[in-house]
Amino acid sequence: MIQLPPMKIAQGEPWGYDFTVEGQSWEGYTGTATFKRSVKAITGSNWYDDAVEPIVTVDVVSDAAGLIQIALTPAQTALFPALDRQGYFRQAMCEVNMTDGADVQKFQARVMVAASV
């Protein structure tokens, strides 16, 4: 599993993230990005009983040059948990899974979330 740089998501804002794996062609691969609450968010005061896991799962776009792109709509980013204060705080994690049927590659990133005011 490869660790990616942290992602920053603002609740209710459109969001995009991309990264490139040098020397890797993603032709023939399909992929998903799954976002879940971080352990800290689950055990902290923000946890609530009717929380849905995962928060959201989306398909990723990839190409032969090694580029992977993830995009979320404002409605999807509004689902992310956030603290009642200004700034970005680690509240979720993302796992990107790429597979071509035989090979599976996984990437993970911490997700920092800022609350909407």
Image: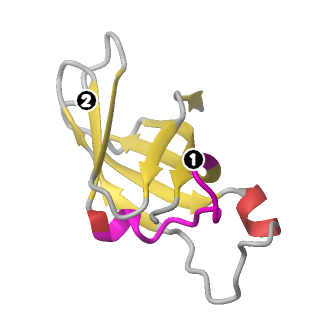
Tell me where residue 56 appears, x and y as whole percent.
Answer: 43, 66
User: Which range is magenta?
Assistant: 75-89
What is the secondary structure assignment of the residue under circle 1?
loop
Q: Which residue, given by chain and number where applicable, does mark 1 sit on?
A: 87
* Residue 100 or residue 108, whichever sits in front: 108
- Seen in the picture, residue 41 relative to 86 is either above or below; the reply is below
Amino acid type, residue under disc 1 in the picture: Gly
Name the residue rendered at 36%, 52% in the picture: 32
Element type at mark 2: loop
Q: Residue at x 57, y 73 (%)?
A: 53
Position of 1 compared to 56: left or right?
A: right
Cα separation, mark 2 vs mark 1, equals: 35 Å
Q: Residue at x 55, y 46 (%)?
A: 111
Measured from the top left, where is residue 8 in percent x and y?
A: 47, 42
Residue 97, image x and y in percent? 44, 45
Q: Earlier in the sequence, mark 2 or mark 1?
A: 2
The answer to whether residue 107 is left or right of residue 50 is left
The N terminus appears in which quarter of the rendering?
Answer: top right
Seen in the picture, residue 116 relative to 112 is either above or below; the reply is below
Q: Nearer the viewer, mark 2 or mark 1?
A: 1
Q: Which residue is mark 2?
A: 26
| Residue 30 screen position, x and y as percent | 27, 46
Q: Residue at x 57, y 47 (%)?
A: 87
Badge 2: how crowded within 10 Å, few (<14), some, or many (20+)? many
Residue 64 occupies quadrant? top left
Q: Quadrant of residue 91?
A: bottom right
Going by the picture, which residue comes out furthest to the bottom?
50
